[in-house]
Image: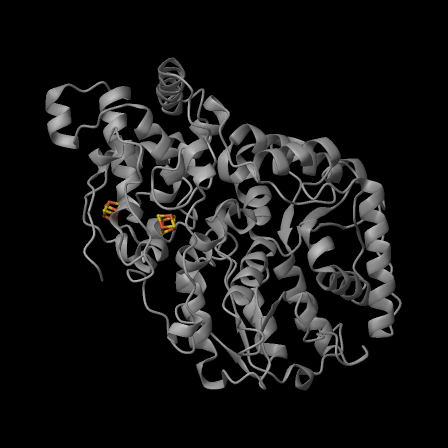
Amino acid sequence: MKDRDTPDPGSMSRPDRIPLTHVDGADLMGLRAPLDDPAREHPFRPLSEQATSRYACILDDTCAVSVPNPATQKEEAALVGAFLSGLDKLFTRENNWTFLQPLLLSMEHCARCQTCASSCHIFEASGRNEVYRPTYRSDIVRRLYFKCVRRGGMLSAWRHGDIDVNWPLVARLIELAYRCNLCRRCAQTCPIGVDNGLIAHELRKVFSQEMGIAPREIHDNGSMLQLKVGSSTGMSAAVVKDNVRFIDEETTERTGITVETPWDVEGADVLLIHNAGEILAWPESVGAFSLILNAAGISWTMSSDLAGYDSINYGLWYDDAQFARVALKHIEAARRLKAGRIVLGECGHAHKALSVVADRLLAGDDNIPRESALTLLRDIVLSGRLRLDPTRNSFPVTLHDPCNMVRLMGIVEPQREIVRAICPQFREMAPHGVDNYCCGGGSGFAIMSGHNFADWRLQVAGRKKLDQVLGAFADCLEPSTRKYLCAPCSNCKGQFRDMLAYYGLWEQNGILYGGLAELIVNAMADVRPGYIEWEWH
Ligand code: SF4
Ligand code: SF4
């Protein structure tokens, strides 16, 4: 590793307007074969001059949020003031009913043991860059908490560390809140229960709720669009129904089984809500679900209500108010149809949003049962209702554990029971289950590619996962052996699509990615063989 400055948390207020640290390929964690070949390395593209002159890109060599540089000192002071007032509110019960208690625990009780550091894939993959250490961001917030919220004096500053409060600090913190996947692997490791991921999340909340600052991809093109037209994909109800009708026809043609997706059926047992991105990017998953649920005789429907056909809830990552608005739309759709339960399709953040976090919001009649598609699919597969021929899945398969479903909700075994039953060449990644590493696309990164952020996301945030995938297929990396990386989550699939393409792993090593439902249909004996088409998409 090259020598590098190791800035302490106080450096974040450095008044200059130049990056605090750099991302250098020579520092990054080494990758195993075949990506140990220098010919397959990627240069980290520098930010354009336009980006550095227009936006506050003074943390590292990339830019996730694109905050315009304030034009005057007065503007800078106003932004700093809004930040401090938001920080104050964050620590009051009436303004932070969602997460105050674990946040206070995380502020008050860190033992500085650094056990969490080696559990963080971003810190490790970056070559242990100090700025990406889980406690680096937390220590800054802790200093601010004791100085500006608790208003401790000199003794407190001596005990907890001091920090100057200025615009460069706030600008760097905005970016630093978006260098964490919110995967909470560090929180699982912490012997005390301090949650560094939560601290990053709460920072994002202050920036969005109090300062109106959030990445365009998750706010304007995400929550806002979804609340306006019904889906962050921009699809209206008419368009989505049209697209699904087309998917039904395609699936019928491919499988030889007539597939029809039911819409707006009142009183159905299951309201299935997909991440609508699946309908556009991975229609084979949507078609597979329709075919399986029909074949298993499930009473089910989809909804054409506003947001009722899109389980996305990006508010989970950055804004409690947006989160609540979207969650209530999902519940409204289910109530209107008098659905017995909501089943969430293969999307990790949607699982956590509506199943776990929304529990703090939903009371009485609104608390409609919510279930993961993984448990429903497991029940179907193990019930014997489908005729399955595992020999149709005779190719190496590995399974990615989406953080939100696995570590954060404890859904570990259902997907494994399916894969073990229908994939004779299944092999686990190391580590897996609740110890998995994030794909690097978590917390919104998978849909963020502004400036050169994709380089950071794929080279740094996704690096550990990439290495795990290569490890799982180390015995069969030749391109003639087709391998399947099963990722039952839309955001994870987006990250894998980008990562496998970036490193040429489909063309040169035969690694394809896809969901879980497709593997089930591929194994169905009554279906025309070859549901998985082994084509890049
Ligand atoms: S967050 Fe937990 S694991 Fe990390 S330094 Fe603090 S006490 Fe140790
Ligand atoms: S939540 Fe995940 S990405 Fe964020 S600091 Fe912890 S381990 Fe690292």
| Quadrant for the C terminus in the image | bottom right
Nearer to us in this view, 319 or 364: 319
Q: Position of residue 230 (x, y in %)?
A: 73, 37
Instruction: Name the side, left or right, on which 52 lies relative to 290.
Output: left
Q: Is residue 529 left or right of residue 487?
A: right
In the drawing, does residue 137 fall left or right of residue 111?
right
Q: Quadrant of the N terminus?
A: bottom left
Q: How many marks?
A: 0
Position of residue 398 measured from the top left corner of the image (x, y, whole percent): 52, 73
Q: Position of residue 182 (x, y in %)?
A: 43, 46
Q: Nearer the viewer, residue 279 or 61?
A: 61
In the figure, is residue 59 to the left or right of 6?
right
- Kindly indicate the quadrant of the structure image that contains residue 248: bottom right
Front residue of 41 and 318: 41
Q: Residue at x 60, y 42 (%)?
A: 354
* Residue shown at the point (54%, 58%) measured from the top left: 495
Q: Residue at x 28, y 59 (%)?
A: 127
Rendered location of residue 49, percent (x, y):
43, 40
Vertical comparison of 99 with 377: above or below = above
Q: How is the image coloured?
A: one colour
Res. 34 image quadrant: bottom left
Res. 267 in view = no
